[in-house]
Structure formats: structure tokens, C-alpha cells
Image (cartoon, rainbow, N blue to C red):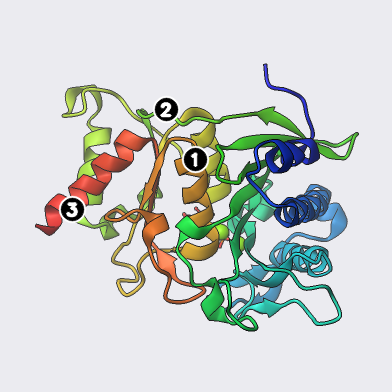
Amino acid sequence: MTRRISLTQYLIEQQRQHGHIPQELRLLIEVVARACKRIAISVNKGELGDVLGTAGSENVQGEVQKKLDIIANEVLIEANEWGGHLAAMASEEMEGIYLVPNRFPQGEYLLMFDPLDGSSNIDVNVSIGTIFSVLKKVEGSKGVSEDDFLQPGSAQAAAGYCVYGPQTTLVLTVGDGVAMFTLDREQGSFVLTHEDVKIPEDTKEFAINMSNMRHWDAPVKRYIDECLAGEEGPRGKNFNMRWIASMVADVHRILTRGGVFMYPWDKREPNKAGKLRLMYEANPMAFLVEQAGGAATNARERIMDLKPGKLHERVAVVLGSKNEVERITSYHLDSAQ
Ligand SMILES: O=P(O)(O)OC[C@H]1O[C@](O)(COP(=O)(O)O)[C@@H](O)[C@@H]1O
Ligand SMILES: [Mg+2]
Ligand SMILES: [Mg+2]
């Protein structure tokens, strides 16, 4: 039975008893959680809050922005800029980094986020989320520039997401396993509902957008063909498939019952490494998945070892149940020889 303590109590334990996090990081995470509560309120209002539909603008990646993409971005910035623990922020929805203005207290941390993940699901009332990643400014560096953000995922001090689904659930790691907190709307607080989350090493469930099959690379096709062959095929077991098209919701299912998620490189845009973004989608999810005993690669290398070249860098993603991720990665490495 999981202890029913609040996010605040959990973080105080992490700070005081286990010495895993400094006070500034605890307070920063609490501010992010408060922002997620505000976003959850907007998400829940839907049509009534005039938050659905497009905003009529494009982000730096050339994607049409939804109203909620912009609302969630503003909520996260407003909540965090006066917190006093941050030097700068970066977001999917902003081209450059956002320096905390001088009128606010300055801190040592850098916060990155995908304010609203699963944008195509907003208007159809399907689970969406917010993904975040926390880094520390490199010691001794004066001021803050984009270069300060370009650290590998292994340097993350904390990472998590909040999924706005049938329940609003915040999932967090500070490098000491993964914990899940469900929002108690009456109390207005996140309550611990799963501690020490573990992803089973094996699975019979995969997640991939099958409509891209004709664009895949041979090792991806080989892996999925083998899954589809079921009991009669080389795997000797039947596989199930799920694709929610919100990475947050797909990863949440994997953290809950296992599975493998893939958004591989494909031939549609051969010059891009993948669709998903390294710094504020792949790295935080990789940190969570590894902390839960799973694995995360770009089909060849560990995602958290990659040294980012730019803020909005893209990456191929294979994550989830360890043995399955290792299999897919080995198919890619074999084909390169
Ligand atoms: O529509 P597709 O190509 O299946 O892509 C779905 C993927 O795109 C994303 O929605 C991208 O995230 P954003 O909504 O933040 O741009 C992922 O959450 C999801 O896994
Ligand atoms: Mg996203
Ligand atoms: Mg987004």
C-alpha cells in the first residue's frame, strides 16, 4: 500500500532524509507542479473556457500552435519566473531561451518544457500532458546562453511530466526512482499514488504510428513484422498495439504496465533525426524510463548520452521495456555492419 503523502511531503523527504535534492530544486519542482494544476484547470474547461482550436500562429518548428500550446507556455513561464530558482527557461513554443528578467530573483537552474504534448488530441478530448526537464547551469559560466542548455540528458537534475487524462497525474524523478502523484481536486494537492515504479523487462505491447510503415528503415520494419507474425512467427507470442499520439499518455501506459514506444527516423524527412525533440521530450522521458528500470535509445545509442547540438534538436526514440528496446537497438546495429 503506497503511503498517501503529498508531493510537498515527498519532496521534503527527498531533501531532508535522503539528501537527494537541494531546497532550491524542491521549490522549483513545486512551482512546476502548481503550474501544471493551472494548466489542468484550463484543459478541463475545454470549450467552456474557449481554450480549444488553433491560435493562428506557428512555432519555431513550423507547427500550427493551438490555443492551449500558448496558454500552457505562458502559465509555465509566469509561474516560474518569480520563483527565484531559475536562470533561464526553454520551450518547444519559443525559438530562443527565455532569461528570467532582472527584476526577479535569479537562480542556478535551467528549466525546459514541452508545455502541451499531444496537441493533435486537445480538440478531441484525449489525454495530453506537459513534459519538463531540469538542468543546472554549468559552474563558473557567466550569464546564461543557449550553450548552457546543451548538456546531455545524463546531467538532468530532475524530470517529469503531468498527464491530463481521466486523472491528472504528475510523474517525477529526481534520480531516485520514479514516483506518481494524482491530483486530488478537492484538496488541490498532488498525492503520492505509486512509489518506486518499475517497468517489466518484457512486454507484448508496442506503440508506433503504423501509417508511416512504408517510410520506415529496414530494422524497424523487421521488428514490427516479427511482432505482427504473433505466435506463428519468430517471437512465438501475440502482440497488442496502442498509439495514443500523445507521447505523455503512451509513456504513462508503459510506466504503468510495460510496453515499447517508438518514433523512429523515417524517409518522410530524411534530414531530420526523428520527429520528437531531444531536450524537452526524449531526455526527460528517457530519465524517467531508466529510473523505472527500462531503457531508452535513439535506436543505436543511449538517448541520455547524446550531446545536443541545438535547443530544438530532434531525435529518434525507442523506449520502454528493457529487453524489447535492446532487441530493436541490436537490429539497427546489426544492419549497420
Ligand atoms: O501524429 P503523429 O505523427 O503520430 O505524432 C505523434 C507524436 O507527436 C507528438 O504529439 C509531438 O508532441 P507535440 O504535440 O508537443 O508537438 C507526440 O506527443 C506524439 O507521440
Ligand atoms: Mg510533444
Ligand atoms: Mg507540445
Q: Which mark is residue 200?
A: 2
Instruction: Give the residue type at disc 3.
Output: Leu
Horizontal and vertical percent position of residue 208: 39, 46
* Mark pair 2, 1: CA separation: 12 Å
Q: Nearer the viewer, residue 98 or 38?
A: 98
Q: Is residue 224 above or below residue 101?
A: above
Q: Please tell me which of labels 2 and 1 falls first in the chain.
A: 2
Q: Residue at position x 24%, y 40% from top? A: 327
Residue 82, quarter of picture: bottom right
The residue most toward the right is 186
Q: Is residue 270 left or right of residue 59?
A: left
The residue most toward the top is 1
Residue 19, quarter of picture: top right
Where is the C terminus found, in terms of image quarters?
Answer: bottom left
Q: Is residue 213 left or right of residue 130?
A: left
Instruction: Give the residue type at disc 1.
Output: Gln
* Mark pair 3, 2: CA separation: 24 Å
Q: Nearer the viewer, residue 329 or 140?
A: 140
Query: Mark 2 packing: few (<14 Cα in 10 Å), some, or many (20+)?
Result: some
* Mark pair 3, 1: CA separation: 24 Å
Q: Residue at position x 71%, y 79% from top? A: 99
Q: Is residue 165 left or right of residue 294?
A: right
